[in-house]
Image (tube, grey):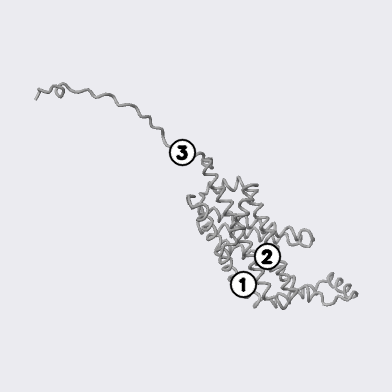
Amino acid sequence: MGPLLDSFWRAAAYCLLPRVVALSLLPLLLITLLAWGGGHFYWQPAVAWMQALLEGSDWLALLWGWLRHFGVDNLPVVLAPLLVLMLATPVIVIVCVLAVALLMAPAIVSLVAERRFSELQRKRGGGFVASVLWSLGSTIAALFALLISMPLWLVPPLVLVLPPLIWGWLTYRVMAFDALAEHASKPERQEIFKRHRLSLLTIGVLTGFLGAAPAVVWASGVVFAATFFVLVPVAIWIYTLVFAFSALWFSHFCLAALERLREQGSGPAGPMPTAPVVIDMPSPPVLASPASSDPHSS
């Protein structure tokens, strides 16, 4: 638990650095443009499709009719935008993870390495292509998990548990790989994943729950329509800052684990080879020849 808490407080302190705050604004610009473009072209059709789906269901029609007796009218009109936002939120979160991984994570790892692990050797066990393929594979797996778990979201406790768990798993897979890609060799990375899998998953799950917290700000933009265009970008920036914090947390934890692994000299390839021991034997005495020993020989 010591390395976990130590890396947590260090990551929290690094979030206050101006460089980290500035880096968190770069993905925000990209995500804001994507969200604006998606909302501009697909918002109205998506809301209309959702409203038609709610009004066209037979069993939901019975529910709407029953609620009208209590003065609750036009509920599908109110629920349609909210449901569209709930479905769009996972997409925004996944884009945030990929944006942080591709744009922020390398810069954050370099920042942590320069300030704390300047003597740590870079073995470059994972390049850019490997990182992209790893992130894409993890993202596809997370999307599949989201798809098959959506029916369970209708159960009130599970909707608060399953999405953060999936975000946490995705964050763990992407951030831990990128934190070690530059400094660790492939065997070292595999050894760290094997030794600290539970701790890495814990960091991912906790940051996954932190990533779910800004959804309150996101939902407030739906309730208070006048502040929608202010609260939604703020929520996206909070998402990005949370993932920047997770990148810092993973960087501090993984690089410290790599440093300890090398200090122990017990990595996956075994102990580091030591220099051969050279025994300094005394040289035998040199006997003078008879010719050189006689001063009158010349």
Indicate which disc, 1 or 2, sits on the residue closer to the N terminus: 1
In the displayed structure image, the side of residue 99 where residue 297 appears, left or right: left
Pointers 3 and 2 in contact (CB under 8 A)? no
In this rendering, the answer to whether 53 lies above or below 280 is below
The kind of residue on which mark 2 rests is Pro
Indicate which disc, 3 or 1, sits on the residue closer to the N terminus: 1
The kind of residue on which mark 1 rests is Thr
Label 1 neighbourhood size at 10 Å, few (<14), some (14-19), many (20+)?
Answer: some
Can you identify the residue that label 3 sits on? 273
Outermost residue toward the right? Answer: 69
Can you identify the residue that label 2 sits on? 90
In this rendering, the answer to whether 155 lies above or below 285 is below
Residue 196 on image: x %, y %: 61, 47
Residue 172 on image: x %, y %: 62, 55
Cα separation between marks 3 and 2: 49 Å
Label 3 neighbourhood size at 10 Å, few (<14), some (14-19), many (20+)?
Answer: few
Can you identify the residue that label 1 sits on? 32
Of tags 3 and 2, which is closer to the observer? 3
Task: Count every numbered label the image shows and give the total.
Answer: 3
Mark 2 residue element: helix
Cα separation between marks 3 and 1: 52 Å
Of tags 1 and 2, which is closer to the observer? 1
